[in-house]
Amino acid sequence: MTSETGASDATETPPNSRFSNLRTSEDWWAIWCAAILLVVSFVGVCLNVSRTSSVEENVEVVTVEAVNPFKAYVSKPGKWSGWHVAEAFYKVDDEGAVSTTIPGVIGVFLVIGIMFTVAMSIRGESAVAFAKAFPFVFVLATISYLLAGQELVKAYNLEYALWALLIGMIISNTIGTSDWIKPAVQTEFFIKTGLVLLGAEVLMGRLLALGIPGVFVAWVVTPVVLISTYVFGQKVLKIPSKSLNMVVSADMSVCGVSAAIATAAACKAKKEELSLAVGLSLSFTVIMMVLMPIVIRYAGMDEVLGGAWMGGTIDSTGAVAVAGAVLGERALEVAATVKMIQNILIGVTAFGVATYWVTRVERDADAPRPGLSEIWIRFPKFVLGFVAASIVFSILHGTLEGGPEIVEAVYKGSTKTFRGWFFCLAFVSIGLATNFRELAPYLKGGKPLLLYVWGQSLNLCLTLAMAYLMFKVIFAEAIGVAQ
Amino acid sequence: MSHASAVRRWSALVAISASILFIWLIILPWISDRPAMKQHLSELDRQGIDGGAMYYTELEVMDRILDKIER
């Protein structure tokens, strides 16, 4: 994603591919930072694995338990209700047990602060300036988490990304973002590091969780809608910015904010384009989350079909679960599983978009097709880190004894929380660098809104048709859902 | 930045912050406390559903669903 420049800049100044890039480039440092967190967490978990065996019906059953030793030192402000904001940091349950997120928040602050200060220093940028400014940006990210942690806000899928953007924009559009804060406004560095960490959660083995019907609903309809929406935006609406067109198409068809972040980074979209796509996605998510269960009930649709429809169309994962739960237990299971399968598409989408951008969009129309070496030079390397993390952790998950327990302990105990903080810091940074007036040209003519509405309408029709075909016709008997 | 402009900008920041505090500490708790909403929120809580989840790994309920599928 570019902060100040457009995607086309990359064609004018090809990035340096020399060996020194490994030491200085942001993409490679995002990979190094994420790799350090993943390896340290993995080693910590492996040192805390216990295996117990028992005999059940003459069969030896091995139970693996994996504990992440860093869990207590990595957390974010939690949920709170009523006027009890302090619950986000310190909670006493009904039995008197105390839980606190304070050491975890301080732990995250220290780890990211120290790691990025060292990275900035090695990259030849001002480490001292970053270290001075980072606490301020981190405090804003913490406030964003506090706003997102209010129980009602949480239930309606108003994610931290929205509040982080808002908090940053309030500062930049009132008192202004002072020069001393700017060294810590590292939008792309935060996003890329978070994305490589997210790769470890993209577990390919879960792709077949719902069998072939799930794959068809999530993996056939989604690319068709993504590509059709992009083409519609270019050919019919004639949206001038291809990256905006792609980010809106991806967040609407894949899985909301996380897909928007991944695609925006892969196609080097501008920060305003990501903000706009996130705003559109979250607004429609809230509307669809409330309306779809009502429509499904009114239409007399059964829970499996309704769940598959919602899972394939509502952008955000949390909203899909809420809408599914409103409809019923079976709807929740199907909706959440379809969305999970769609979530795993993020890796393929980011890789595909990055490749398309490098080979087609950034290429001069008159120039010959770029060779492999040029593609390598231009390719955003962090995408490779993202895909590599996904492949490595999918293999560990599927092949290690106790693989699921170990891999889950790695991301649930620490890297998932770091990933959330990196995205939150990135959105605060976007807000701090955005002037309200800069957003106005993107809203002109309402084209992004039209694009979203057209794409989502197509998504609703195709997903319903495919879900009906898969769950009610072809595999109806096999999955025991025939009427 | 002139003194008047600085005062105006800081006043805007204070006013927006006060509005946020008012919404988050008065309006939202009031809505959350309505009986139907209270029931909806506690049901989501009971099922381990985080409406703000960005990715499936953030959903507690996924563990139960995946366990059921694997069995």
Image (spheres, rainbow, N blue to C red):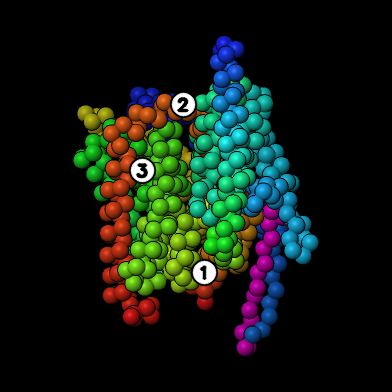
From the top left corner, tell me how far across and down residue A273 is, in percent.
Answer: 39, 35
Q: Is A447 on the left-hand or right-hand side of A30? A: left
Q: Is residue A435 above or below residue A358?
A: above
Quarter of the picture holding the N terminus of chain A? top left
In front of the other: B1 or A196? B1
Q: CA distance from mark 1 to mark 3?
A: 30 Å
Q: Amino acid at mark 1?
A: Ile
- Residue at horizontal 69%, vertical 70%? A51
Q: Which mark is residue B65?
A: 1
Q: Chain of mark 2?
A: A
Q: In this figure, which residue is indicated by the disc labeled 3? A: A248
Quarter of the picture holding the C terminus of chain A? bottom left
* Quadrant of the rendered image containing residue A383: top left
Q: Is A3 on the left-hand or right-hand side of A160? A: left
Q: Amino acid at mark 2?
A: Asn
Which one is in front in this view, the residue at disc 2 or the one at disc 3? 2
Q: Residues within 10 Å of mark 1 (few under 14, many from 20)?
A: some
Secondary structure beneath dot 2 equals loop
